[in-house]
Amino acid sequence: MDNYYVNDNAQSTGEHEVHKDGCYWLSQVRSKSYLGSYASCGSAIARAKAYHYSNSDGCASCCPLCHTK
């Protein structure tokens, strides 16, 4: 299980990226919300969409299976 976070600031393309602990890009995020501990990025993305930002996507580096945009 990994801990996941969503970037509170949208990318220039409008989506909020979801990252997991240890991601280089997460260390660059100034404002983030903790989503919880999940077995997959898909569950973390679903949480981000339901409770934070409907336009969420996985980070290309740490969540490549959930990176769709």
Image (cartoon, rainbow, N blue to C red):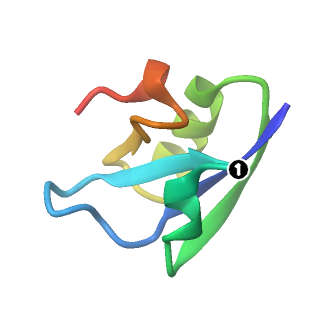
Residue at 60 percent of width and 49 percent of height: 23
Residue at 50 percent of width and 48 percent of height: 18
Residue at 60 percent of width and 43 percent of height: 47
Image position, residue 14 (x, y; %): 19, 57
Residue 33 is drawn in which quadrant?
bottom right
For residue 12, side relative to residue 24 (left or right): left
Quarter that holds the C terminus = top left
Image position, residue 30 (x, y; %): 50, 81
For residue 5, side relative to residue 56 (left or right): right
Q: Residue at label 1? A: 22
Q: Mark 1 Cα within 10 Å, few/some/many (few <14, many 20+)? A: few
Residue at 39 percent of width and 35 percent of height: 60
Which residue is situated farthest in the front direction here? 24
SS for callout 1: loop
Relative height, residue 29 to residue 17 (above, below): below
Between 68 and 60, the one nearer to me in the picture: 60
For residue 63, side relative to residue 60 (left or right): right
Relative height, residue 47 to residue 69 (above, below): below
